[in-house]
Amino acid sequence: MNIVRELRLRAGMQQKDLAISAGVSRPTVSEWEHNKKDPSGDRLKRLSEIFGVDPGVILGYKAMRNPSDHTQAPMTDESKLISAVVDRMPQEDRQRALNVLRAACAEYFDEGEGKKMA
């Protein structure tokens, strides 16, 4: 299985979710998953942040340390509500909401943790 697809499925994401998070179109995600093209530059860095893996893992030249590290916790009712609202937002509003969330949560995530908000 392609690593981008494997990481996406482990994260419980659909292609459209990954596309929104990575700032690309859904067909681009499909091209990555079918090895028609590789993510590069900023997109590779973004995928690395989304999945919490080294860019080399995404490109296939490094192994994941422990696949169980990439399981997703069950969604809470609050998470489901937020997801439903965000799914209905126009892209511009999603970006504004994400910026507000990042600013609100910044104090909880320090640079040394390696698990900052994506």
Image (spheres, helix red, strand yellow):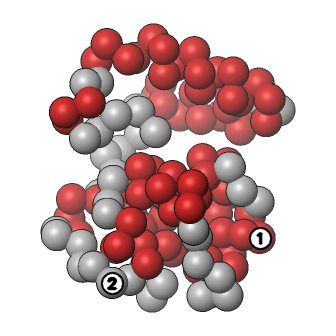
Q: Earlier in the sequence, mark 2 or mark 1?
A: 1
Give how far across and how far down residue 87 sits, in percent.
71, 38
Question: Height in image: 109 above or below 74?
Answer: above
The residue pinned by badge 1 equals: 27
Which residue is at a point 42% across and 72% down the rendered structure image?
Answer: 58
Q: Is residue 117 visible?
A: yes
* Mark 1 neighbour class, 10 Å CA radius: few under 14, some 14 to 19, many 20 or more: few
Quadrant housing the N terminus: bottom left
Q: Which dot marks residue 89?
A: none
* Mark 2 neighbour class, 10 Å CA radius: few under 14, some 14 to 19, many 20 or more: few
Q: Quadrant of residue 116?
A: top left
The residue pinned by badge 2 equals: 61
Disc 2 is placed on an element classified as loop
Q: Nearer the viewer, mark 2 or mark 1?
A: 2
Which residue is at a point 25% across and 41% down the rendered structure image?
Answer: 114
Which residue is at a point 35% across and 73% down the rendered structure image?
Answer: 56
Q: Residue furthest front?
A: 41
Q: Amino acid at mark 2?
A: Tyr
